[in-house]
Image: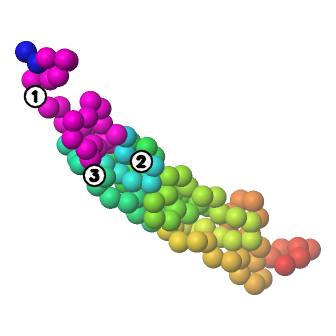
Amino acid sequence: RCADGGMTAPAACLAGEYQDATGQTTCKACPQGYYCDRQGLIAVSGNCPAGFYCRANQVNFHEFMCEVGYYCTVNSFEATACPAGKYCDRSMLGTAPNNCLAGYYCDETKITEPNPSGKTC
């Protein structure tokens, strides 16, 4: 029996959590932009890689992939919508989007389209 509410054996932090200090009574949530892929971690497993985003308590970085129309740089915790005048034409885009090409326009659908007659580029 442990005095003062202690435990008879330590409990491992769950996947999605970590604890980097001794003598603690709880685990820390894996922060946004990082992942914690197994039990008993003393530090986060790694940065969320480009092309993906990681929410708090994330276990696997590949759970949330950036879709077409969005981009995710390293340590993203949410997908960033492709801004007007740019295009994000593939999933898992991990860099800033490209400028819309001459002769094309990039509207709110985030898709590059040939310039139709009557549109100004």
Q: CA distance from mark 1 to mark 3?
A: 21 Å
> Range of the magenta residues?
3-28
Does the residue at mark 1 contact the one at mark 2 (Cβ under 8 Å)? no
Q: Which residue is mark 3?
A: 43
Q: Of discs 1 and 2, which sits in the foreground?
A: 1
Secondary structure, mark 1, is loop
Q: Residue furthest front?
A: 4
Sequence-first disc among 2 and 3: 2
The residue at the point 55 percent across, 55 percent down is 79
Q: Position of residue 45 (x, y in %)?
A: 29, 55
Pointers 2 and 3 in contact (C-beta within 8 Å): no
Q: Residues within 10 Å of mark 3 (few under 14, many from 20)?
A: some
Percent x, y for residue 81?
Answer: 64, 58
Residue under the image location 30 percent in, 36 percent down: 27
Q: Which mark is residue 62?
A: none
If you read the primary sequence from the N terminus, does the residue marked by circle 1 or circle 3 appear first? 1
What residue is pinned by disc 2?
Answer: 31
Please give the name of the residue rendered at 75% of the width and 84% of the height, measured from the top-left corner.
102
Distance, label 2 to label 3, CA atoms, is 11 Å
- Quadrant occupied by the C terminus: bottom right
Is 8 or 18 nearer to us in this picture? 8
The residue type indicated by label 3 comes to: Ala
**Picture layout, residue 63 above or below residue 11:** below
Which picture quadrant has residue 8?
top left
Q: Residues within 10 Å of mark 2 (few under 14, many from 20)?
A: many
Mark 1 vs 2, N-terminal side = 1
Residue 24 lies in the magenta-colored region: yes
SS state under label 2: loop
Residue type beneath disc 2: Pro
> What is the number of callouts on the image?
3
| Residue picked out by circle 1 | 9
